[in-house]
Amino acid sequence: MSDPILALPRFSVVGEQPFQDDLLNRKQLAIHLTSYLNRLQAGAVIAIDASWGEGKTWFGRNWAAHLKNESHKVIYIDAFEQDYIEDPFMLLSAEILEVMGEDDLVPNLTETATNIAKALVPMGTKMIVNTIGQWALGTSNLSDKAKEFLEGAVDDGAEVSSGWIKDRLTKHAGDKALMQQFKEQLSEFANTDPERPIVIFIDELDRCKPTFAVELIERIKHFFDVPNIVFVLLLNRNQLEKAVKGVYGAETDAALYLSKFVNFFFKLPKEEIGETLRYDRTKRFVLSVAKKYKFGNAQQTEHFFNGIALLTLVLNLSLRDIERCIALYAFAYPHQLSNPLLAYVTALKVSKNALFKRILVNDIRAHELAKEQIDVMNARLVHSPNGDRYLNALSQWHQYHIKKTDEVPEPFRGYAHHLGNYDIGTDQIFQALNEEIDLRMEMY
């Protein structure tokens, strides 16, 4: 029996065609959103909101490829990879200038953008302060003379800083004219094809440093709010609101703040209709990921993958959670206890680790909370009038611990009976299954 691989090779999220292997029917959402673009000639900022691990990047990359196929000018920025840049204005300007290629407007727009960057980033002052700071940090034992030099340097730095501020105040009118000039030049380029807006995707914004994330959306509003440019922000709205509060204070109304910069928020749906339809599509996704790990014995792993697909509904697993469950299963493969109950233990460990740890030590309240989750979802499913057999078994498993009874009910008995070969009681099953995926190493 061959063992599965332990890590998937890096691969492009976009196949030979956009939305290839679209197991969650995300292409329809992209087509729907594309129809909005041509009605946003005035320019706009739209946000695609989803929790981490729900496939925002996959959706964004594939939608961007779809738009390119329709002759849109498209820019895709991973903000998290570039939040080291001094000011987001430089990042956005550089990306736009790159997509402009050899357009005749490039020289003028480059010069204007350069002058704006100079106004935004006081390079002279920062160079002085940074040089002093680096020199001081690299000195292990400062003499009195060196300290006097530093004090003098700081005073000089303060004078330079003061001079820069005075200079900016006297040039305020010029800066306003410069901003207007930049927007006019940018607008001229954006309207070279009025039927197709330039679409700028910004991914991973919620993972950036709070100051960079907030400055970026402010720069979009102040400098790039021109006709025929549409920004698409791929983000976790809750995390971005925390970033806003981190910059402006905990009492800030972050939702109201973001509404001033974002025209439309769209939620990236997990599924369109019905729990049964969601289960079917989730199962296809689970099996597609499992196939990439190259498990050798399909019959042995079938119950595990079916369980993960169903538990996605119960535990609200993200796509990334699903991949982590399968990766953990592969890492501990082959298993001594090949049992469908292992899927539940694995999914719980990955997605709700705090609750998992409490169950591991037989916390009765934790068993009650877990049972409530299972029962609520089981009641919503339409498999049969009595609910799903597997979910009934999991509910009974928790009930056994809550009631502390010696009786092992059906259908749980059907899933647990062959574990008796390992000389463990029903109250030890959870711990025994955890040991299957608990990667322990002995030190010699």
Image (spheres, rainbow, N blue to C red):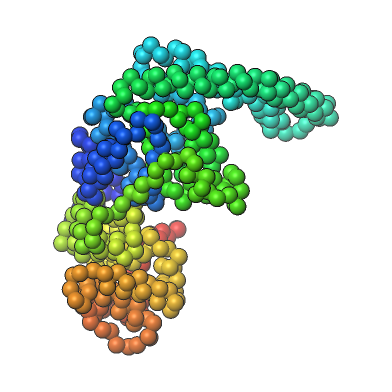
Name the image quarter holding residue 172.
top right
> Is residue 89 depicted above or below 62 in this figure?
above
How many numbered badges does the structure rendering display? 0
Query: Residue drawn 48% across and 39% down?
Result: 261
Residue 67 quadrant: top left
Q: Which of 205 and 430 is in front in this view?
A: 205
Left or right of 438 in this view: 276: left
Measured as percent of width and height from the top left, residue 404 is found at 38, 86
- Viewer-nearest residue: 8 or 73: 73
**Closer-to-camera residue (292/322):** 322
Q: Where in the figure is residue 425, as x and y percent of width and height?
A: 32, 81
Q: Please, is residue 212 above or below residue 315 in the view?
A: above
Instruction: Residue 160: tell me if it is visible.
Output: no
Q: Is residue 143 above or below residue 366?
A: above
Indicate the position of residue 249 as horizontal and vertical percent values: 61, 48
Q: Can residue 236 be seen here?
A: yes
Residue at 40% over, 63% down: 352
Q: Quadrant of the N terminus?
A: bottom left
Relative to 327, is 19 on the left or the right? left
Residue 88 in the image: state x and y as whole percent. Answer: 50, 31
Which residue is found at the position 52% from the left and 45% from the top?
A: 257
Of 155 and 29, nearer the camera is 29
**Residue appearing at x 47%, y 32% in the figure:** 220
State which quarter of the image contains the C terminus: bottom left
Extreme bottom residue here? 406
